[in-house]
Each structure stands twice: as structure tokens, then as C-alpha cells.
Amino acid sequence: MDISMTGTRATDEVRARPRTDPKGLLGAVFVLGGAMMSLTGMVWDIQWHNDVGPDTFFTAPHLVLYAGSAVAGIASLVVVLATTMAERRGRPVDPTVGGTAVGVFGRTFAAPVGYLISGVGAALFLVYGLLDERWHRLYGFDVVIESPPHIGFLLAITLTMVGAVMVSAAALGKRWGEITTVMGLALLLGFDSIVVEGLNAFGLGAVDLRTAGISFVSVLPLVVGARLLGRPGGAIGIALILAALQALYWWFGPWATRLYADAIGQPFRDDPVGVPMVPALIPMTLLPVAALVGPLLARARDNGRLAMVVGGIGGLVITVTAAGQSMLLLGEGAFDELPVMIATAAAGTAVGVAAGFLGVRFAEILRSLAPAGEGR
Amino acid sequence: MRKIVMVLLGVIGLLLVTTPTAQAEEPIKVVHTEQVQAGPYRLTVGFSRWPLKAMQSLDYTFTPDGGIRGRSGTLAVIAPDGSRYEVELARHPRQREVWGLDVQSLDEPGEWTFRFIIDGAQGQGTGELRLTMLEQPGPPLAISWAIGSGPLIGLIALIVVGWRRVRPRASIAH
């Protein structure tokens, strides 16, 4: 794809906009809503496989999953087309709606960069969905998360969620932009708690990669949230929203699975897992880590060193407690052996350090999406 | 703006209404069987695909002569390298009158062993079935994983572009 900068015109009117201005909110809500449908579809689908079983391309949980990317993708397309039309008619393009517009395929389309990413993620989801169908024809309906096409479309949804965060960050000068940024980062963290299951494909060696990986995908959004908003609430809000979602899904996953199984007359397995799977995978100690990350990093005048220390501590806490959580809720003995336990804790700390460093930098990059003077 | 919302809602509605949802599944088509003698119990093991190929998932059915009523047991699945996992014998979700495993794949080629321990009125019996798993079908796994990682490579490229465009700041201006 050929992408070039088209030189957005930010007008005085744009700069003078009040914090309650709703322009751009609708597109952000649709992209975030699509992302939330994707997460909800995954929660339901994973529960279905564990408690009931049979799979086809068109199960109800799959439809929710597909609809999530469809909603986010169509919303992204609509905004890109509207922006393209506005630019062609010589109207000023507002960079608070999805960020600076970039030219795609020469200057055929003017795409706000956030919507470009969320739209590309949705399109890739479609491509990997088709590859998944091909995979299932070749290998059968394997019910594992860690197959190449599954990881492909989970990463595509992640890309859509990153786009949703970019769209929100572009509107950081407005009240709703702050709220949707925190919501987007919470969805990203929740969803990536599933994506890191893909690391199980590497097998269990000296380090439990999945448990160490959960440290990275947890610390990174918390640091980004704190730095983007410049307030402890940026990190604490993520943890609170995710805790609320976790509680909701704890009820929803088993309930929807029971409802659907009854509706199609499919009995439960003799040996259902019996635990809400995805809520059990999402770390439960995010709030104390956010309470550390938020106040320490939100306004720190430091270019990453403090974030690395705080990230390392947060990563260690999340790694150890996530392993305990898996053992307690899912009976997974990741920490059966002391050497694996020590190596995994060390790896989780190391990736927490990396996430702290990257989080500060990513927040700077995201803040650059908001017009000067609007982001913090 | 209201038009856009209506169009979006219409598309979503159409997606949900016109797509068929899953119905309860049909019983398994067994294309091959093997016999296992586990002490006093004779067990028929059915396969929905044959021959077996690594990574290719299939349904297994385990049917003792006289049925599963009043009987229980475990299945130990032993890999060519000796690693193993054990499961309780549970009814197949799509064929509830027999035990089974639904859409299971075994990932390594080589000789696998299914070891059954069955308890019932005639006491406990143990029996083994050796299964040869052929090489996986399809392209080499490395190629499949390279394709599956595509969006991650795209994400890294996005980060690199952002990293180079935005200069780091030593502190936040408030």
C-alpha cells in the first residue's frame, strides 16, 4: 500500500474547540464497540469449546466475533471515505477525528491514520478468517487457540484495537477522548491476555513464555495510559474498567454458553472446564500494579528510567500472581518446578522493564496524533 | 450523520439475520476401527479419519462391548517421545452413548500409544493400542507461522514509523 502524508489543515476553529465537542465521537464509539464485540465473541467462543464442544464456521459466538471486525471495519471505511470527500471538496480535515490524514494509494484516499490502522486490522481479520477456513479443511476443526491462522486473526483484531486507541488519542483534548483512550487500552489488555496464549505454541521449556508474556501486555497499556492522560487515573481507569469487564464476562461466558447449547439442543460435555476461561486468563492483580504505575509515572519528568524500574516491579508482580491464578483457577501447574518458576519470574520482570520503557515512548508517539495544544 | 448510523445498523442487522447459525451436530462417521482387549473388557476404537496424520484433528470413539453404562476409566495418551497426558473417559459430545475425544489432533509423527484402564463389574482391566501417526499434511509449519505472524510484523512496522517520526522528549510539558 502506498501511503503518504497529505498535509492536514488544522484551523483556528479546530484549536479553539471546547473539550465537550462531540465531533469524531461516533466513529470512535463504533470502532471501540466493534473491538468490544470481538472480545465478547472470543469470551463466548472459548467457553463454548471448553464446556460444550462442536464447532463450525457459523456458530453464534463466531458470528459475534466476525460482527466485531465488520462493525469496526465498516466504521473505519465510512470515516476514510468521508475524510476523502471532505479533502477533495477543499474542506478542512479535522485531525482530532482519527489523527492526521495520510494519502493511501497515492492520494486516492485521505485516511486518518487511526482509522487506517483499525480498518486494515479489520480487513486482515477477513483474510485470516478465510485462511482459517482453509486450515480447518486441511487439518480439521482443531479447537486450539495457538494455530497460525487463529493467531493471525487475533493479531489482526489487536491491530484494530491499536487503531481504536489511536483514534481516541487523537481526541485527547476532549473529555470523551480521554475516556475512550482508557477504554481502548483496557480492551487491548483484556484481548491480549488471550493472544499471548499463542506463546504456548513454543512449548514449555525453561521459561513459561505465556506467563511471562502476560507481564508485557499488562504493563505496557498501564504505562501508556498513565503517560497519555498525565494522571494516575490513566492507569487506574484501565484496571477498573477491565475488572468490571472481567466480572461481567465471568457471568456472561457460562450463561451465554448454556443458553446457546440449550437453544440448539446440544448437551454439555461430561468434563466441562467449569471456570469462566477468559476472565480466568485476565490478570487479577492489575489494580495494585496500576496504583503503583499511575501515581509514579503519570507526571514523572524522566525519559524512561523510572518507567523501566516501575515496569519491572509491575511485571514481576503480574507474572507471579498470574501463574498463581492459573494454578488456582485452571489447575495449570506452570510453576511446578522451581527452576522454571525462577526463570519465568525473571523473564516476566525483564519484559516488564521493556514494557515500561516502550510505554513511555509509545505514549509520546500517540500524543503526537492530537493537534498541538490539545493533547497533554 | 443519522443516515450513516442507520446504514451501519442495517448492515450489522443483515449480517446477523442472514447468516445461518450452528445446529446440533450429526453423529460421527467412523471410517476405521481397531480392537483393544483391556482385561475382561473388549473395546472398539473408532476413527473419523484414517490413516492418522500429525496435526490433523479427528473424532475418536471408544465403545466397550455391552456399552459404557456402569463403567468408567481413564485414557493415557503417550507421545513418541514418552511424554503423556491422562484424561477421564468421557462421553463424546456428539455421540453420547459412547466415550470419545472430539476433534483432537496429535501433533508429532511417529508411534503413539493409547493406554486404557477400565473399571466395571468385572474389575479393572488395562489395554493398549499403538497408533502410527504419519507426517503432517500441508505446507511446512514454519511457513504457516510466518503467514500467521503477518499482522504482528505490520504492527512492528507501524511502531518503527512512529518511533522515527516522533522525537523523544525528556519530560512531559504541563
Image: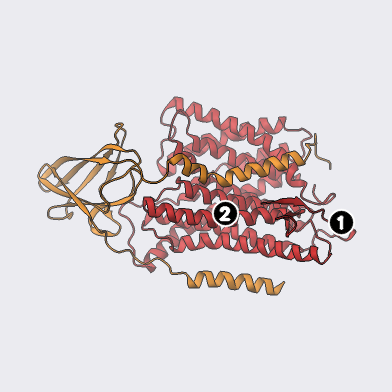
Chain colours: A red, B orange
Task: Specify whether residue A201 is in view.
Answer: yes
Q: Is residue A193 above or below residue A247?
A: above
Please state which amino acid type lies under the numbered disc 1. Arg
Query: Can residue A295 be seen?
Result: no
Circle on res. A52 = none
Residue occupied by mark 2: A124
Q: In the image, is A233 to the left or to the right of B120?
A: right
Q: Circle 2 — which element?
A: helix
* Residue drawn at x 15%, y 48% as measured from the top left: B43
Q: Depth check: A346 or B52 in front?
A: B52
Residue under mark 2: which chain is it in?
A
Q: Which percent across, then down, holds residue B108?
A: 34, 38
Q: In this rendering, would B101 be left or right of A196?
A: left
Where, by quadrant of the figure, is residue A261 drawn? Answer: bottom left
Name the residue type under label 2. Answer: Leu
Residue A255 drawn above or below residue A373: below
The x and y percentages for residue B11 are 58, 71
Q: Which residue is mark 1?
A: A15
